[in-house]
Amino acid sequence: MFKTIEAHIRKQVAPAALRAEFRQHEFESMRPFCQLVFCVSILIWLVFDLIVSFLGDQGFTWRSYVFIALLGCLTVVLRFTRRSHHFDVLNLLFIAVITLSMRLVIEGIPVALRPVWLVLGVSTVLYALSVLPTRRWSFFCAMVITWVVLNPFYHTRIEPDALEGAMLISYAVFLSGLVSYSYLQIRKAKLHNFYLSKVLLEQAYVDALTEIPNRRSFMTKAEQQLKLATPGQYLAMVDIDNFKKVNDRFGHDIGDEVLKRVALHIKAAMVDSEFARLGGEEFAIFLEGQDQQGAEQLVEALVRRVRDDAGAHPVTISIGLAQVTAGDTLTMALVKADQALYEAKHTGKDRFVLWTSRLAEQG
């Protein structure tokens, strides 16, 4: 099954919204790595600059301080960058500054050694570029900037039509092609994996029929909310009245339509709450920040909303409402709500019942 889903996804063309979501997700997850790359790049350049400055008897000039300040500022800005498209621009600025600083340092070494160090600098920059979460336009712009600034034929004794020049050109083409191919393939694989993970998570935590969260999702989120212990927590269990008769009389297709319609009502009425389809015709709602009156008004409005739906095959719902008190586990809260739901179903339906200790004694 996994291979079937994977093969299907790889044939799809990812929509623009999904690509944008992927870029943002990738940047957020890789931002610490990007900061590490920036810091290591500055450190390597600084060590090289110190070696050239002192062993080459050139001194540590004011230009070095300017470049350190610029690169440091860009690294600090990255710390506060939150959007992936901002990083695309920031990365281009960093590439422009560090390649220019590398060029000026390499200009201070003997002419015969410059081509080797320039090509080494290009290789290092392009490798770092290939693993950073940048968009294609930013990647290729950075590649152009790198080759223009660190051009191994500028201020060197190598001629393009000479043997050494031809070898350098061949290496440049090979390096650029290899890095570009690696970058594009890695991005494609990451996008497919993100899409696949998204599909599998939706299948695991979203009810396929009603397209609202399922039991697994609800239990996970409700457990987290219980741990936060925010005030005014209530749990409601919702059941469609006489749903079996709807299935028996009109068929399961109509039953599915009824389930989807009730789910839409819950989704519209409980915007700020956690809700889910637990299974069959049962739904659950987790309310927060409500006093008793507010919680009762919300569930009463939901009962009325479903009752007043003038669509085909109208139904009603019953709701069991229970306050989540200190020390209650999710299981305990569900038991209370279920007891209240049982009372609502057996005292007329199309209504809600608030749990009290009396219901526990009856059970």
Image: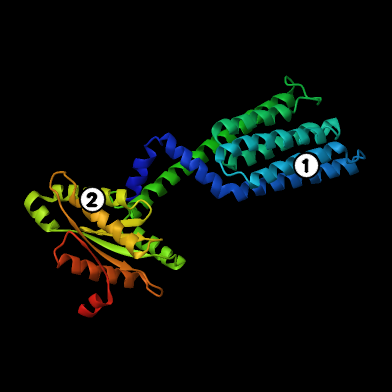
Q: Amino acid at mark 1?
A: Ala
Helix, strand or loop at disc 1? helix
Q: What residue is at 64 percent from the left and 37 percent from the top? A: 90
Relative to residue 111, is residue 359 depicted above or below? below
Viewer can see residue 360: yes
Task: Give, as a three-letter code, the residue at label 2.
Answer: Arg
List x then y, in percent, for residue 69: 78, 42
Q: Nearer the viewer, residue 45 or 26?
A: 26
Residue displayed at 29% across by 61% down: 296
Residue 359 coordinates in the image, percent (x, y): 23, 75
Q: Which residue is mark 2?
A: 305
Residue 116 visible within the image: no
Question: Residue extending furthest bottom?
Answer: 361
Q: Which residue is mark 1?
A: 69
Furthest residue in direction front, as rendered: 293
- Secondary element under disc 2, as helix, strand or loop, is helix
The answer to which of 334 and 236 lies nearer the viewer is 236
Q: Residue at x 38, y 53 (%)?
A: 272
Question: Looking at the rendering, which quadrant does residue 291 occupy?
Answer: bottom left
Report how far apart the C-alphas of labels 1 and 2 lie in the structure: 63 Å
CA neighbours of label 2 inside 10 A, class few (<14), some (14 to 19), many (20+): some
The numbered dot on residue 186 is none
- Residue 100's spot in the image, x, y percent? 75, 33
Q: Is residue 8 above or below residue 295?
A: above
Q: Position of residue 131 (x, y in %)?
A: 59, 42
First in sequence, mark 1 or 2: give its number. Answer: 1
Q: Is residue 330 left or right of residue 106?
A: left
Residue 123: image quadrant is: top right
Kindly indicate whether the residue at mark 2 contacts the one at mark 1 (C-beta within 8 angstroms). Answer: no
Tell me the quarter of the image containing the C terminus: bottom left
Name the residue at the right extreme. Answer: 57
